[in-house]
Image (cartoon, grey):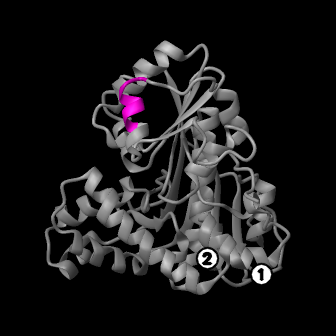
Amino acid sequence: MMKQRYIKTSVELDLAEKMVFVGGPRQVGKTTFSLSLLGIGQKESSPAYLNWDVMADREAILNARLPDGQTRIIFDEIHRYARWRNLVKGLFDKNKSSISFIVTGSARLDYYRKGGDSLQGRYHYYRLHPFSVTECGANTDKVLLAQLFRFGGFPEPLFRDEARFHRRWLREQSSRILYEDLRDLEQVREVSMLELLLQHLPACVGSPLSVNSLSKLLQVAHETVERWITIFDRLYLSYRILPFGAARIRAVRKEKKLYFWDWSRVTNPGARFENMVAGHLLKYCHFLEDTEGYAMELRYIRDTDRREVDFVVLRDGAPEFAVECKTGEREVSPACRYFRERTAIPRFYQVHLGEMDFGNAHSDTRVLPFATFCHEVGLP
């Protein structure tokens, strides 16, 4: 039985007033989640579920023939239609007093909402993330935590818990993103080159991303590689974070770090754990933005002498806490102490996959298991 997703309560409240758009990576569970909003046991065969890829549903949408007796209607993949925003606007304006609309999609739904938006003020947007420690109940379950670390947080491979299935799922997902979703988003001829880039990027996780090195490796222009990585970001395949600057540190200013929405793509255990922590923190940031309206940012700290703390979370421009990742149970990182003395970051944590728990986040650095950190900080 599928667990209730972490955004469901907030979405239910928002549907009383506006449309809800649900975006996120391919196969993260958007359709399953949306169907759960129709009631217990609802499936794709429900008359309230309209999929743009199904010809009969497409004709019904274009002709504004909505199913009778439905108080909630799902439009899935409607973003593939060039004029989908005006179409949805008209249907909402005419039926908003009697029908709640849920619109699901991936890259294009999110990307095009940032331009001139005829739907402005008519919807709330949610980004659905993979399962996390708290959401799948791994706070007190070491076996499930190891499963989450190995297979990532996407529902199918996580709950299937099979290495063979996971390998095949990764290959198929990559192929669908590159040869289906990419085609819908951008005019790109060199898909095979993007495939090579995707194969190399997991080795870049954990270090500042050098686009110059990638351009030399692939023998293409710097601007081309930058554009390709931006496309990956729009496809919810990867994301990048910026460095955090403060007055008393000589912080690097331009170097970004790259992570994957699916941390199981990263083979190195240390880099995979860092990516897993990044995914949990980004989920926290997006959840507070989407439900509470805060301006959240995920950044990292690094100075010109290469001292580094992996992450710092900012709320409305002010640092909330910093997190350093270690695969083993070690003493406090010297970088945490250094940056505590020179920044206004109120709390420092050092997380690991072991058992040790000591220190104080407010006065020094709290060293603790990652699952404990997720529970105490309140990550979704």
Magenta stretch, main secondary structure, is helix
Picture residue at 15% right of the left edge, 64% below the top: 189
Q: In terms of depth relative to the viewer, which is nearer, 276 or 348?
A: 276
Query: Image quadrant of residue 200?
Result: bottom left
Q: What amino acid does circle 2 point to?
A: Phe
Q: In terms of depth relative to the viewer, which is nearer, 242 or 289?
A: 289
Position of 237 with respect to 2 (left or right) is left
Q: Is residue 55 above or below residue 96?
A: below
- Extent of the magenta region: 58-64
Return the x and y of residue 371 as percentages of the image width and height.
77, 68
Return the x and y of residue 162 as percentages of the image width and height.
64, 83
Q: Is residue 18 magenta?
A: no
Q: What amino acid does circle 1 point to?
A: Gly
How packed is label 1: few (under 14 Cα within 10 Å), some, or many (20 or more)?
Answer: some
Q: Quadrant of the N terminus?
A: bottom right
Picture residue at 50% right of the left edge, 51% below the top: 24
Cα separation between marks 2 and 1: 19 Å
Please give the residue where the numbered disc 1 appears in the rendered image. Answer: 354
Please give the residue where the numbered disc 2 appears in the rendered image. Answer: 151
Q: In terms of depth relative to the viewer, which is nearer, 284 or 33?
A: 33
> Depth-wise, is mark 2 or mark 1 nearer the camera?
2
Q: Earlier in the sequence, mark 2 or mark 1?
A: 2
How packed is label 2: few (under 14 Cα within 10 Å), some, or many (20 or more)?
Answer: many
